[in-house]
Image (cartoon, grey):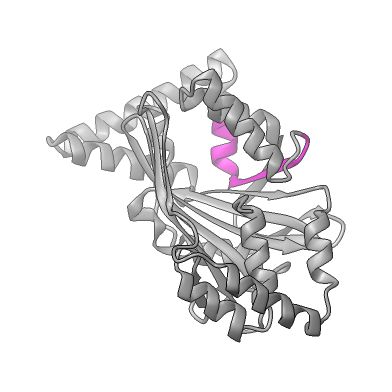
Amino acid sequence: MRYLLLILFFFSNSVFAEQYELEKGALINLPKNYAVTKEKVGVTVERALKSRRFTEEEKEMRRIAHLQNGESVDDIMYSIDSKKRIEFYEKDLDPWGKAENDIILSDLINECMSLYKVKKKIKKCAYDKTDQLLEFDGIDTYIILFKNEDPELNRLNNISDDVLSELSKKEIAQIRKKYASNINWRSKNKYFKEIGIRNIKITGMGDFYVETITSQKIGNYKSTNIRFILPYKNRRFIINANCQTSDCNNAKEKMAKIIEPIFKINTKGIKVYDFQKKQDMIELLEKVKNGYRAFKFAKLIFLIV
């Protein structure tokens, strides 16, 4: 339970006061009193595979999918977290520091038990007080900027408008009645389950990105996962947020604000195209200037031939 206590808080008035440089020329905004920690993607993925209790076969399938999707084990994951929460986790690595943290959490739980009798309210109280203490907004956020250029993205970015028009017509003729299935996956032991949707989004400026929203269940823990995937200099750029339902209201706005120096998104002025619907894909290809590029980018991401 002590780890679940580190997940919630309401994102409302965070001030973006600093910037962080992922690489030369690639800046992101940081909320006030937040910082960035780095870890290789391979390390993060292996930890996730273990925590979800996948079979060896499932682990191998996931590793292959990551590699087919253009990821490298040496790509860097940039986690964006409150400075106090980072310090708390760092203390947890030391036995004495962990003991100090356990005392803090125990005191918070006892305080909540003195206020409430119902288990659900005690749990919610402990979540809130812990996150207030750690100045955490309840939205776990990370970024991955692929280090390798994608040959297909490079090709798409160099196709002329005339050729794009002809390619769009050919692509429309090949679209099936139902283009692609929704996200619906569970592990063999049913410990991990994920269901969700994926959309292509076009901004008012004609730029595009792919958004996936899924509900995840790991054991008894449930959360919502939101991901933006966008092209950046012939590479893929991912920003991901994980939150519980009560904290997710402002997740998209937070994500958009973080990546604003790189990619501007007005989350209230966007045209949405459902990747599962044939008619949406036809409209995207027929009527949107960058529709073919957006469509092929989405196919590339979802490994659809």
Residue 265 against residue 112 in the figure, above or below: below
Q: Is residue 64 left or right of residue 181?
A: right
Residue 229 against residue 108 in the figure, above or below: below
Residue at 54%, 22% (x, y): give it. 57
Nearest the eye: 128 or 212: 212
The reply to whether the magenta stretch includes residue 87 is yes
The reply to whether the magenta stretch includes residue 283 is no
Q: Is residue 252 left or right of residue 142?
A: left
Residue at 72%, 63% (x, y): give it. 231
**Which residues make up the magenta segment?**
74-90
Q: How many marks?
A: 0
Residue 209 against residue 51 in the figure, above or below: below
Nearest the eye: 216 or 288: 288
Q: Is residue 262 left or right of residue 182?
A: right
> Is residue 233 visible to the viewer in this orientation of the structure?
no
Q: Quadrant of residue 190?
A: top left
Nearest the eye: 162 or 210: 162
Specify the quadrant that holds the N terminus: top left
Horizontal and vertical percent position of residue 13: 47, 65
Horizontal and vertical percent position of residue 210: 58, 63
Residue at 51%, 82% (x, y): give it. 269
> Is residue 149 visible to the viewer in this orientation of the structure?
yes
Horizontal and vertical percent position of residue 22: 78, 52
Horizontal and vertical percent position of residue 106: 34, 25
Residue at 34%, 45% (x, y): give it. 128
